[in-house]
Image (tube, grey):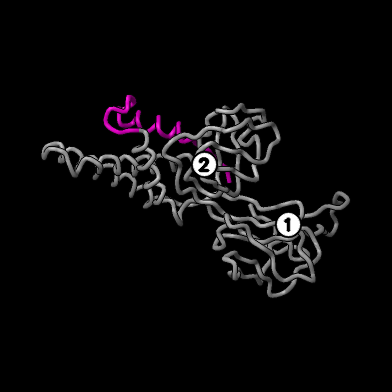
Amino acid sequence: MDLLLRSQSEMLADVQALLRDSGAARWTAAEVYGAINRALGDWAGRVSVTALYAPANLMWSTTQYEYDLPSYIDEDSIQPQYQAPMYDRGVVLPTNATTWVDLYGWSVEPTASGGRKLRFAQMPTNTAGRIVYWVTPTKVPTTVPTLSSSLAAGATSAVMGSVVDCDNVGWVKVDSEYIGYSGVTRTASQTTLLNLVRGQSDTTDVLHNSGASVTFCVGYPRADLLNQLYDRAMAWLHTMFMGNAAPQERDVHGQMIRLFNQRADEFWRKWQPRRAPRMVIGYRAIPREVL
């Protein structure tokens, strides 16, 4: 699955161009961002991209049933895996060749402190572990925040000098570098993005100076999804005029609402998510993809 990224500034310019309102004469930037966020509600249950929780110290153990889950992972869309050696009769494999295999017989339970634990019905083997999970973008900030201090190359956290309403997992663009993050902490005046993955989408991990803009991005697997997002956002923008416009103007906005909503709905009627690969069970029950 491809990961495509579009920054909030780029989406703002796209929608303004489609509405022929590049000068923000009819809708402010905050209003456009708000409409995009409402339109992202359409993607819930339909659109997601994969992410990976794989800290270096995550090891499954035959003496442990429970493992803490990070708060930013959606428990309804996870798949724990373990690392297993690869064997194939008649095939010479590299020394210590391994693959990742799904774990079964698990559940997610709440804790007394409000957290969550991953619990196995049967203890996994002593081996490295990871969790594949799926992310659906739900919002971008209605302003573009900035770094409160410089972001060094290789740094794994970024501090912004304001309280930012953003997803707990997502992507940002700082200068020309795309950066993934997992986890957010907030104080009364700052927001920190955690567990940064630098240099995504073929960009370069470099130093960024204090005051650089941090534009949040929407991640999606197919380019045509942006058309649906923009159509729904434009319908929401025209809805803003229905309460205080003159009757003739309301008629025009009503026609635009019907047009853009119809196009957005038609997209879902022909929408066919990429089907998961069909699997066959090979030697030692290691799945192989059938192309």
Tell me which label, 2 or 1, sits earlier in the chain. 1
The label shown at residue 189 is 2
Which residue is painted at 59% across and 28% down in the image? 210
On whether residue 11 falls in the magenta region, the answer is yes
User: Which residue is situated farthest in the top direction here?
Assistant: 23
Other residues around mark 2 within 10 Å, as few (<14) / some (14–19) / many (≥20): few
Instruction: State left or right for residue 49 relative to residue 103.
Output: left
Element type where label 2 sits in the image:
loop
Image location (x, y in percent) of residue 1: 58, 46
Report the front residue among 45 and 269: 45
Q: In which quarter of the image is residue 37?
A: top left
- Disc 1 residue type (three-letter): Trp
User: Which residue is situated farthest in the front direction here?
Assistant: 188
Instruction: State left or right for residue 90 relative to residue 116.
Output: right
Element type where label 1 sits in the image:
strand
The label shown at residue 100 is 1
Which residue is painted at 34% across and 26% down in the image? 22
The label shown at residue 211 is none
Image location (x, y in percent) of residue 96: 86, 53
Instruction: State left or right for residue 55 relative to residue 150.
Output: right
Q: Which of marks 2 and 1 is in front?
A: 2
Which residue is painted at 69% across and 31% down in the image? 153
> Over which residues does the magenta segment extend?
1-28
User: Which residue is situated farthest in the right direction here?
Assistant: 95
